[in-house]
Amino acid sequence: MPLQAIKDDRVLRLPEVVSLTGLSKSGIYQAIQDNNFPKPLKLGKRASGWLQSEVSSWITSIAEAREVIHA
């Protein structure tokens, strides 16, 4: 991802990712472990976050997969 795109992106914390995706906390971490969800950025010793663009891309890919299945 180009540096400018990252600079213009938002970092989402876990509660917002849960809200946007509809997944539970454990579901998100299981999907990460299964390589089916974007990995979080380490923001500090005890803080992580996700790039909004990566979460949005994941949601789009799920929606597109649904369209292929139902077509």
Image (spheres, helix red, strand yellow):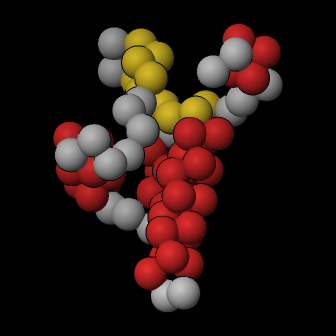
Q: Residue 18, percent across and down?
A: 45, 57
Residue 55, placed above or below residue 66: above
- Count up the numbered dots: 0
| Residue lying furthest bottom | 70
Relative depth, front residue between 68 and 61: 68
Q: At 56% from the left edge and 39% from the top edge, which residue is drawn?
A: 54
Q: Quadrant of the C terminus?
A: bottom right
Q: Is residue 20 visible in this depiction of the protein?
A: no
From the viewer's perspective, tell me whether residue 47 is left or right of residue 55.
left
Front residue of this view, candidates 45 and 68: 68
Residue sitting at x 64%, y 39%: 53
- Assign the N terminus to one quadrant of the image: top right
Give residue 27's position: percent from left, percent from top. 27, 58
Q: Nearer the viewer, residue 21 or 54?
A: 54
Seen in the image, is 2 located left or right of residue 30?
right
Q: Position of residue 29 (x, y in %)?
A: 26, 45
Whether residue 48 sits left or right of residue 30 in the image: it is right
- Identity of the residue drawn at 78% across and 15% down: 4
Q: What percent of the width, then of the height, locates residue 23? A: 38, 63
Please identify the quarter of the rendering in which residue 67 is found. bottom right
Q: Is residue 58 visible?
A: yes
Q: Is residue 1 above or below residue 15?
A: above
Give the residue at x 48% y 31%.
49
Q: Quadrant of residue 32?
A: top left
Is residue 48 shown left or right of residue 7? left
The answer to whether residue 23 is above or below residue 5 is below
